[in-house]
């Protein structure tokens, strides 16, 4: 009998470029950060992820997506929860240099759960 490790559900709002790299990984890993991205920010609340994808990613990236994934809870304990605003605006701040190790603790696949296409521009 195998004992399943406890996991924590995280969400990640993302744009089309990052989502394509996740797809290329077989839905198993987040891509390395760019030099101007020293931290990977998964969030702990689905509604917060939806707001970022819909209100920020669509405007800046042309479309927004929300993914959901599970990470071993014991591993996540090293990252204190950061409150980035209101009580549901909770993030983990994973240093870019630790992303490969973070990816190794993802359980199962990263799932695409919401899509927000580009909005037509008013003329």
Image (tube, grey):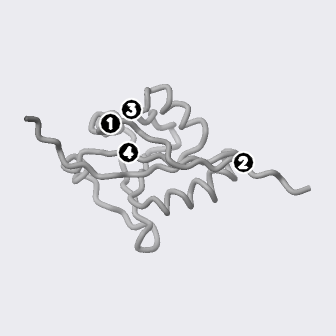
Q: Split into 4 quadrants, where in the image is the N terminus? A: top left
Determine the residue located farthest toward the bottom in the rendered image.
Answer: 86
Q: Is residue 9 left or right of residue 27?
A: left
- The reply to whether the C-beta atoms of the residues labelled 4 and 1 are less than 8 Å apart is yes
Judged by depth in the image, the label closer to the viewer, 3 or 1, is: 1
Comes first in the chain, label 2 or label 1: 1
Q: Split into 4 quadrants, where in the image is the C terminus? A: bottom right
The one nearer the camera, 84 or 119, is 119
Q: Which residue is mark 4?
A: 69
In the rendered image, residue 8, in percent from the top left (x then y), is placed at: 29, 52
Determine the residue located farthest toward the front in the rendered image.
Answer: 1
- Mark 4 lies on a secondary structure that is strand
Determine the residue located farthest toward the left in the rendered image.
Answer: 1
Q: Residues within 10 Å of mark 4 (few under 14, many from 20)?
A: many
Image mark for residue 12? none
Relative vertical location of residue 53 with respect to residue 32 in this rendering, above or below: below
- The reply to whether the C-beta atoms of the residues labelled 2 and 4 are less than 8 Å apart is no
Q: Which image quarter: residue 44?
A: bottom left
The one nearer the camera, 57 or 65, is 65
- Mark 3 lies on a secondary structure that is loop
In the rendered image, residue 85, in percent from the top left (x then y), is placed at: 46, 71
For image coordinates 45% across by 59% down, the residue present is: 46
Comes first in the chain, label 2 or label 4: 4
Q: Which residue is mark 3?
A: 28
Label 2 and label 4: CA atoms lie apart by 24 Å
Q: Which residue is mark 2?
A: 118
Q: Which residue is mark 1?
A: 108
- Mark 1 lies on a secondary structure that is strand
């Amino acid at each position: 009998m195998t004992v399943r490790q406890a996991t924590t559900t995280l969400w990640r709002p993302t744009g089309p470029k990052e989502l394509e790299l996740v797809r290329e990984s077989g839905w198993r890993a987040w891509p390395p950060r760019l030099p101007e991205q020293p931290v990977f920010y998964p969030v702990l609340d689905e509604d917060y992820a939806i707001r970022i994808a819909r209100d920020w990613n669509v405007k800046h990236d042309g479309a927004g997506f929300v993914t959901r994934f599970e990470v071993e809870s014991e591993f996540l304990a090293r990252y204190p929860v950061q409150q980035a605003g209101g009580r549901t605006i909770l993030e983990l701040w994973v240093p870019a240099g630790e992303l490969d190790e973070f990816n190794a603790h993802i359980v199962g696949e990263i799932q695409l759960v919401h899509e927000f296409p580009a909005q037509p521009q008013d003329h």
